[in-house]
Image: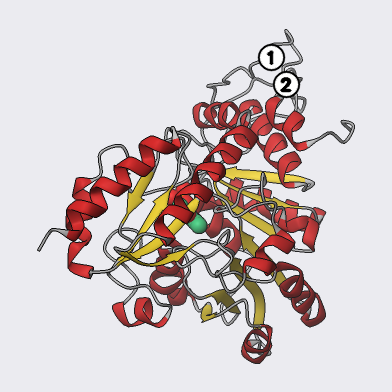
């Protein structure tokens, strides 16, 4: 066991110490599918890279340490990680999810897993009475996002963990939006953390990956089994990129958050912005709950333009902020959830959670704040005068 060390130290030294052969500080990329046996029945713990790969193992160790979990398994995408978690359930099981869920998770649940007999319901996870009411005899898990994507709704993680424990069901948190630099759900009593490593963990928009982190050994075993049995594993190249990204996680998240806090103030005071959704603004209805369970509001801001028809002009006018899906990288990105990330969620359900076509989502990067503010200001000006 490594001595317990501070988050920043664990991040900066992600992977250090895993090369036993030469002491390489940067973990070697083991691009091998197979491993030779030393003798019949005797190998070195590795036989086939779908099951075991040293580069991937180093990345998994690092992710587990940062999330404060005992074990991490990594996958070829965030959706593969969510799918692996869903192998814990069987036909007839009911899973209660946050409403305003990530569009890809909603698509997996509604368009694929429902056909296998799993049942899903969606509630406001910030409302414990509603959560209790929706838990039935066949409910097996809570699947939580906080803040939600893109409405930035907040769940009470300690409360949800307590309800799950009381009912004898699993609590699962998709922690992609916060990253462990800001929120560590396992320390609040949550059983399973899922990540799209494509976002903050990787941080450079150069890899697609996912991770599941747990503390319970039997859950760890089941996730390892799912990784090997389903086979959607993180490649050694991507594992190396992930390790490299993790080294600056705390710095990137901190700087992006500083930028975001300033931009949220700018946007919420702008006359052509109707509403700004950011848990760091005092007017956010659950800012206090968020502050009680996370170390900061993060760097994702959603906001509504005053006029829906001005959205295309606004998005096309941005120059520094890139119009692209995804979030959590060093570059600032903007998306239009209604037609991009959340297009597979029916319009009625989008409307039910408050997701309107006037909404845009900003993932703030680590550029100079002034450049970002100037860019948003000029695009808002153009949008306002558009018709
Ligand atoms: C992107 C994302 C996912 C899916 O991850 P991929 O790596 O794109 O498969 C899941 N949950 C959230 C919250 C995300 O933002």
Q: Position of residue 50 (x, y in %)?
A: 57, 37
Q: Nearer the viewer, residue 110 or 337?
A: 337
In this picture, is 344 found above or below 231? below
Q: What residue is rendered at 53% in x and 50% in y?
A: 261
Indicate if the residue with disc 2 has its beta carbon within 8 Å of ligand 1: no
Q: Nearer the viewer, residue 127 or 193?
A: 127
Residue 3 lies in quadrant: top right
Mark 2 neighbour density, 10 Å: few (under 14) some (14–19) many (20 or more): some
SS class of the residue under badge 2?
Answer: loop
Q: Is residue 260 visible?
A: yes
268 left or right, relative to 345: right
Labels 2 and 1 touching (C-beta < 8 A): yes
Marks 2/1: CA–CA distance = 5 Å
Say which mark, if any, is on residue 16.
2
Q: Is residue 323 visible?
A: no
Classify the position of the N terminus by image quarter: top right
Classify the position of the C terminus by image quarter: bottom left
In this picture, is 385 found above or below 377? below
Q: Position of residue 281 (x, y in %)?
A: 55, 62
Say which mark, if any, is on residue 25.
1
- Residue found at the far top of this picture: 22
């Amino acid at each position: 066991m490594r001595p317990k060390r501070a988050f920043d130290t664990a991040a900066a030294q992600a992977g250090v110490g895993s090369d036993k052969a030469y002491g390489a500080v940067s973990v070697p990329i083991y691009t091998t599918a197979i491993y030779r046996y030393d003798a019949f029945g005797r190998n070195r713990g590795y036989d086939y890279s779908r099951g075991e790969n040293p580069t991937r193992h180093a990345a998994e160790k690092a992710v587990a340490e940062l999330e404060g979990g005992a074990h991490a398994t990594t996958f070829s995408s965030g959706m593969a990680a969510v799918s692996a978690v869903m192998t814990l359930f069987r036909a007839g099981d009911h899973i209660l999810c946050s409403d305003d869920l990530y569009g890809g998770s909603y698509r997996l649940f509604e368009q694929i897993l429902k056909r296998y007999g799993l049942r899903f319901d969606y509630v406001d996870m910030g409302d414990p009475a509603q959560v209790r009411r929706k838990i039935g005899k066949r409910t097996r898990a809570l699947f939580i996002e906080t803040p939600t994507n893109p409405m930035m709704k907040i769940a009470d993680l300690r409360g949800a963990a307590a309800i799950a424990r009381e009912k004898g069901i699993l609590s699962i948190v998709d922690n992609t939006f916060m990253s462990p630099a800001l929120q560590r759900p396992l320390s609040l009593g949550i059983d399973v953390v899922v990540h799209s490593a494509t976002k903050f963990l990787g941080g450079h928009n150069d890899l697609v990956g996912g991770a599941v982190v747990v503390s319970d050994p039997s859950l760890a075993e089941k996730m390892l089994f799912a990784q090997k049995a389903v086979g959607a594993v993180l490649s050694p190249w991507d594992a190396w990129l992930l390790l490299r990204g993790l080294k600056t996680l705390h710095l990137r998240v901190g700087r992006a958050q500083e930028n975001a806090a300033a931009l949220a103030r700018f946007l919420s005071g702008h006359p052509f912005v109707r509403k700004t959704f950011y848990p760091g603004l005092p007017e956010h209805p659950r800012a206090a709950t968020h502050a009680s369970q996370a170390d900061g509001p993060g760097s994702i801001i959603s906001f509504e333009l005053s006029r829906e028809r001005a959205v295309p002009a606004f998005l096309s006018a941005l120059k520094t902020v890139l119009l692209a899906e995804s979030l959590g990288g060093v570059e600032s990105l903007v998306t239009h959830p209604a037609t991009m990330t959340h297009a597979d969620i029916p319009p009625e359900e989008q409307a039910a959670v408050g997701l309107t076509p006037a909404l845009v989502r900003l993932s703030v990067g680590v550029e100079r704040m002034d450049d970002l503010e100037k860019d948003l200001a000029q695009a808002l000006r153009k949008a306002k005068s558009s018709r």
